[in-house]
Amino acid sequence: MATGVAAIRHMLVNDPDVSAIVGPRVYPDWLKQDAVMPSIVLWTVSSRAYGVMDGGLGIEASDIRVECIANTRSEADELWLKVNKALTRTNKKGLYNGVMVQSMSQSTGSYNMADRPVDGSDRWVYRTIQSFEIYYYLYEKA
């Protein structure tokens, strides 16, 4: 289904600096425990549709959390710098994978997390996280 996550995934997979680090490893919703690192996970924090009394406008807004995940803090931060540049340095209005993006902006600064090993190993996972607000509608050809 075409969503704000699908649009942001399209932007990141097609950005040369981001794809040089992660290739196609930009996932919606969750990351497999044995995933190759570094990777990116996108998930919708909240979403709302806009309408008027006589019907919907078709415009939606979503807060999308972008997690840059890696085996070291420096790898996660390096990936975050590329992702942040890809999503903030140019106007993102346009059609992405069936989603017509009207506008996009940062809704948080970056913050860091580290996940303790849960499988008996000593493998820590590091995350650098930022959220973006995206306004869009689903594009249908006439």
Image: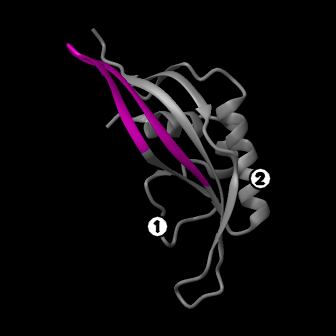
Residue at 43 percent across and 54 percent down: it is 29
For numbered disc 2, what is the local secondary structure? helix
Q: Which residue is nearer to you in this view: 135 or 35?
A: 135
The image quarter in which residue 108 lies: top right
The image quarter in which residue 105 lies: top right
For numbered disc 1, what is the local secondary structure? loop
Crowding near the residue tagged with mark 1, few <14, some 14–19, many ≥20 C-alpha atoms within 10 Å: few
Q: Residue furthest front?
A: 53
Residue 7: percent from left, percent from top? 48, 33
Answer with mark 2 or mark 1, whichever residue precedes in sequence. Answer: 1
In the image: residue 98, left or right of residue 40? left
Quadrant containing the N terminus in the rendered view: top left
Q: Residue furthest bottom?
A: 120
Look at mark 1 in the image and give the residue it sits on.
Answer: 32
Residue 43: percent from left, percent from top? 46, 49
Residue 92: percent from left, percent from top? 59, 23
Q: State the CA–CA distance, disc 2 to disc 1.
A: 22 Å
Q: What is the magenta range?
A: 46-67
Q: Would you say the magenta stretch is mainly helix, strand or loop?
A: strand
Quadrant containing the C terminus in the rendered view: top left
Crowding near the residue tagged with mark 2, few <14, some 14–19, many ≥20 C-alpha atoms within 10 Å: some
Look at mark 2 in the image and give the residue it sits on.
Answer: 78
